[in-house]
Image: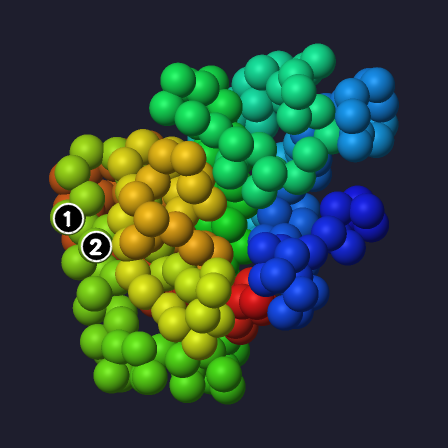
Amino acid sequence: MDKRTFLKVGSLAGAGIVATPLVSSLLGCGSAPSSGEAPHATTSEGFTLPELGFALEALEPAVDRMTMRIHHGKHHAGYVRKLNAALTNHALSGQSLEAVLAAITVSDTGLRNNGGGHFNHALFWNILTPSPNPQDHVPSGILAERITANFGSQEAMLTELAQAASTRFGSGWGWLVQDTHQPDRLFVASTPNQDNPLMTGIVDAEIQGRPILGIDVWEHAYYLNYQNRRTDYVAAILDRVNWSAVAGLMA
Ligand SMILES: [Fe+2]
């Protein structure tokens, strides 16, 4: 992990409230390629494809090996490659992925699709687990407290999240998001395509925040194994969530 990036602080820190590692730093996303010539930039090789923390077949039967191989090795790798190409000699050279995502406008199609694609998938891999350890599969500690306070119960949160992901029309994502200004507030959202709650120049203000869990509902994520049964896929993914990892992404 790039130390300079890791030590950057989130927007709360900008308000003098608390120092918070960027989610993209925790996920090992890298930073925008730079020659070191752009303002505020340091030399960097660019964004990188994070390695999976488990074997390709480790999530079976929830996610099959072939889907994982294509999804991570082709789709996600493609987003990283195209994102770096779009940012070469760009004004955002050397910036964090959060800074890039926050700067995107509706006309920045390449950055929007590939910047979002990189962040979203890095998050997705991070919050999935083949672990048989029961404590990984149930929210605990402050995360559990925040879920209960905001949704009434963990079951209610899971129902709302499954609904948001399952009913997103076309390709997109379902999210559990932490309010940047009120860290105790968690909420569910969904976005189309590769948009995410960090794209403050694109998504509605009420769904902007710090994504701590994302569910990919593009057909490339499930069609080989589930065909049109997206609801079954979403339920299987929720059974494979590593809630310890989700908790670790909160500010
Ligand atoms: Fe995907």
Residue density around tag 2, few if under 14, some if 14–19, many if 20 or more, within 10 Å: many
Q: Which residue does the image show at 32% across and 65% down from the upper left?
A: 187
Badge 2 amino acid: Ala
Reply above or below: 193 against 119.
Answer: above
Disc 1: which residue: 167
Is residue 113 among the parts visible in the rendering?
no
Q: Which residue does the image show at 48% across and 61% down from the upper left?
A: 180
Place of residue 1 in the rendered image (x, y in percent of width and height, measured from the top left): 77, 48
Badge 1 amino acid: Thr
Left or right of 242 in this view: 90: right
Q: Which residue does the image show at 79% across and 29% down from the upper left?
A: 41
Label 2 element class: helix
Asked if the beta carbon under badge 1 is closer than 8 A to the nearest atom of ligand 1, the reply is no
Left or right of 158 in this view: 125: right
Reply above or below: 182 against 4.
Answer: below
Left or right of 182 in this view: 84: right
Residue density around tag 1, few if under 14, some if 14–19, many if 20 or more, within 10 Å: some
Disc 2: which residue: 164
How does the figure colour the protein chain or chains?
Answer: rainbow
Place of residue 121 in the rendered image (x, y in percent of width and height, measured from the top left): 48, 42
The C terminus: image quadrant: bottom right
Place of residue 205 in the rendered image (x, y in percent of width and height, measured from the top left): 33, 48
| Callouts 2 and 1 close, C-beta under 8 Å | yes
Is residue 176 among the parts visible in the rendering?
yes
Distance from Cα at disc 2 to Cα at disc 1? 6 Å
Label 1 element class: helix
Place of residue 188 in the rendered image (x, y in percent of width and height, measured from the top left): 29, 61
Q: Which residue does the image show at 36% across and 78% down from the upper left?
A: 147
Q: Quadrant of residue 37?
A: top right
Q: Quadrant of residue 54?
A: bottom right
